Image (tube, rainbow, N blue to C red):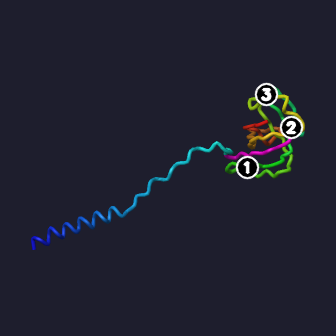
Amino acid sequence: MSFKIPTLFYFLFLIMISCTSSKKVKPPPAVEPPSHGIPRGAVQINAEIISSNERIDCFICYLHVKEVLGYGPTAPSLPADSKIEVLIPKSLIEKDKYGDITSGKRINLIIVRRRVVGKSESSIKWEAIRLKI
């Protein structure tokens, strides 16, 4: 009988090891680095400038959307071939390129809906956050 007890413990030990080693531990899911694509709520468009009005710190442009290149998460729909008014901060444009904001010029930009605090008479619903002339 004494021979059977150590053998029994040996087999229990082997069974315990085999059961624990058969459980495959999955590594935690990899966290994706932040994307430098289109931000939340934004739309990337290719547009033609119909008209522009230079102000102290921005350009107000009336654009013809030629192509919608993509949407960020939760972005509102914007159909191609629509006409929109966009505020383009001068901080997005190099000073020597101010003259490029003219009628007929094609631009690629990422726009977001403007957040207007309080009552505003402005009809401008879009603002550029990135611009490529």
Span highlighted in magenta in the image: 40-48
Looking at the image, which residue is at 74% across and 50% down? 76
Looking at the image, which residue is at 90% across and 36% down? 103
User: Would you place residue 69 above or below residue 2 in this image?
Assistant: above
- Residue 41 colored in magenta in the image: yes
Give SS at disc 2. Answer: loop
Q: Amino acid at mark 3?
A: Asp
Cα separation between marks 2 and 3: 20 Å
Q: Read off the residue under disc 1.
A: 70
Give residue 17's quadrant in the image: bottom left
Quadrant in which the C terminus appears: top right
Cα separation between marks 1 and 3: 28 Å
Q: Position of residue 48 (x, y in %)?
A: 86, 42
Q: Position of residue 118 (x, y in %)?
A: 75, 38
Left or right, 76 with reference to 85: left
First along the sequence among labels 2 and 3 = 3
Q: Amino acid at mark 2?
A: Lys
- Label ID, residue 105: 2
Q: Amino acid at mark 1?
A: Gly
User: Would you place residue 33 above or below residue 2 in this image?
Assistant: above
Q: Are marks 1 and 3 in contact (CB under 8 Å)?
A: no
